[in-house]
Image (tube, rainbow, N blue to C red):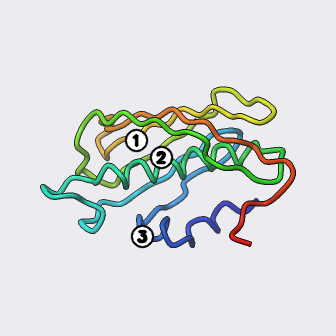
């Protein structure tokens, strides 16, 4: 799968997401600081952080997915520090892959390596159909 195509999705493009690496159940993304994805006070909006973590987790799963498609089943995020020193990195690592469920750990850090958010998510592996609006 060509993972770079995801950078052309509208949401990923809005975030300015750049894929650094995707392989073997791991992914690393970079998000630049941009005021359009900030809340008041100039800190990154939590929804933008969580969205980038969803992308990172999904890419980590896609790199080991032996089914047809996948969807995020659950994603829990703990926000630890306000994030305002970009660029930011988002790293995801598969912790356990089952037949239909994959558990992933995700970290969001600023340019100084400060941990701003941690996440734990579950992706559901689809084996019988593609997910689309049709």
Rendered residue at 77%/36% (across/down): 100
The residue that label 3 is drawn on is 14
Horizontally, is 117 left or right of 39 in the view? Answer: right
Secondary structure of the residue carrying tag 2 is: helix
Q: Residues within 10 Å of mark 3 (few under 14, many from 20)?
A: some
Q: Which mark is residue 108?
A: 1
The quadrant in which the C terminus is found is bottom right
Q: Are marks 1 and 3 in contact (CB under 8 Å)?
A: no
Mark found first going from the N terminus, 2 or 3: 3
> Which residue is outermost to the front?
134
Q: Secondary structure at mark 3?
A: helix
Q: Nearer the viewer, mark 1 or mark 2?
A: 2
Residue 98: x %, y % from top left = 77, 29
Residue 53 - label: 2
Residue 123: give its label.
none
Q: Determine the CA span between mark 2 and mark 3.
A: 15 Å
């Amino acid at each position: 799968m060509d993972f770079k195509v995801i950078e052309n999705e509208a949401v990923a493009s809005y975030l300015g997401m750049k894929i650094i690496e995707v392989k073997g159940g791991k992914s690393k993304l970079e998000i630049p600081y941009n005021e359009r994805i900030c809340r008041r006070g100039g800190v990154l909006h939590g929804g933008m952080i969580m969205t980038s973590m969803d992308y990172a987790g999904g890419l980590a799963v896609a790199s080991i997915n032996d089914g047809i498609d996948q969807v995020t089943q659950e994603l829990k995020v703990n926000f630890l520090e306000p994030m305002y020193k970009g660029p930011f990195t988002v790293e995801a690592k598969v912790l356990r892959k089952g037949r239909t469920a994959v558990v992933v750990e995700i970290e969001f850090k600023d340019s100084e390596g400060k941990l701003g958010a941690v996440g734990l998510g579950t992706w559901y592996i689809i084996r019988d159909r593609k997910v689309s609006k049709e």
